Amino acid sequence: MNALAIDNLDISYGDSKVTHGIGFNVAEGESFALVGESGSGKTTVLKAIAGMAKSWTGSISVFGEQRTHGIDRGFARQCQMVFQDPYGSLHPRKTVDATLSEPMAIHGMGDSGARVDEVMQSVGLDRRFRFRFPHQLSGGQRQRVAIARALILKPRLLLLDEPTSALDVSVQAEILNLLKRLRREQGLTYLMVTHNLPVVSFLCDRLAVMRHGRVVEIADVGQLKRGEMQDPYSRELTRFSAAHPQT
Ligand SMILES: Nc1ncnc2c1ncn2[C@@H]1O[C@H](COP(=O)(O)OP(=O)(O)OP(=O)(O)O)[C@@H](O)[C@H]1O
């Protein structure tokens, strides 16, 4: 089954249409990247799937269920988003414990204490951080909390919006390794926006290249690694990445 099926997706902000006829599928257990030009609508696609960009036409289906435009609690248990900036995405006056317990209370799930313990352990956060506030944590620890919060309801699909780009170089690899391990251990499916092609090679199976609000190419990561992308813009992107290696 596909974890995600996107068809003919047009997303607008007010009168301005940002994406045009986006279509791609992500298989269950697959890790799929959206790359491409800045402003081409990558984050907007994630937001539409997550219910944060409301004005869209076309079809979004998650594990075979059509996404509606409204708030959908059942959907939140299937799919969660992790944002680029863990400092901005965590509530400054909530402890790690409160941040992780709250979604469980909202969804009426019992025994949050044990689940908070379990999820903190799975993302490599020591117990002593449980009652700390975001400003008392490092950037990498904050991103672990953000990933833990995304996982607390046991979703099967994670939407990752540049999950390492706001972190120090030395911490990026730790978080990428964590994401790789979590996917393997929990059978997760990832849809990830990134500017970093080496990250795509490390963590993803396939990628879609976006430009001007359209998907110009969908390829296997093997094609990316072998320099066998077809579209001229994709080739330009790969050449640029090779000439300006990121960490
Ligand atoms: N809330 C908003 N209201 C109006 N326009 C927006 C809003 N958010 C994004 N946009 C516009 O939508 C377009 C796509 O933005 P989006 O953030 O999806 O691009 P992106 O491909 O993720 O870019 P980047 O790689 O720079 O993060 C841009 O032109 C942006 O200015």
Image (spheres, rainbow, N blue to C red):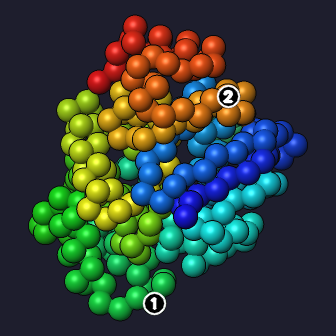
Disc ID at residue 100: none
Q: Which of the two marks, 1 or 2, is nearer to us in this view?
A: 2
Q: x%, y% of residue 3?
A: 54, 61
Amino acid type, residue under disc 1 in the picture: Gly
Q: Is there a contact, CB below 8 Å, between mark 1 and mark 2?
A: no
10 Å crowding of disc 1: few (<14), some (14-19), many (20+): few
- From this viewpoint, which residue is outermost toward the right? 15
Residue holding disc 2: 216
To which quarter of the image does residue 39 belong? top right
Instruction: Identify the residue shown where x is 35% and y is 41%.
Output: 203
Give the answer, above or below, for where 46 lies relative to 106. above
Give the mark nearer the N terminus: 1 vs 2: 1
Element at badge 2?
strand
Query: In which quadrant of the rendered image does the N terminus lie?
Result: bottom right
Element at badge 1?
loop
Instruction: Identify the residue shown where x is 41% and y is 81%.
Output: 104
Q: Is residue 229 left or right of residue 149?
A: right
Disc ID at residue 108: 1
Q: Is residue 155 left or right of residue 19?
A: left
Give the answer, above or below, for where 138 lies relative to 166. below
Q: Is residue 89 visible?
A: no
Q: Is residue 181 left or right of residue 234?
A: left
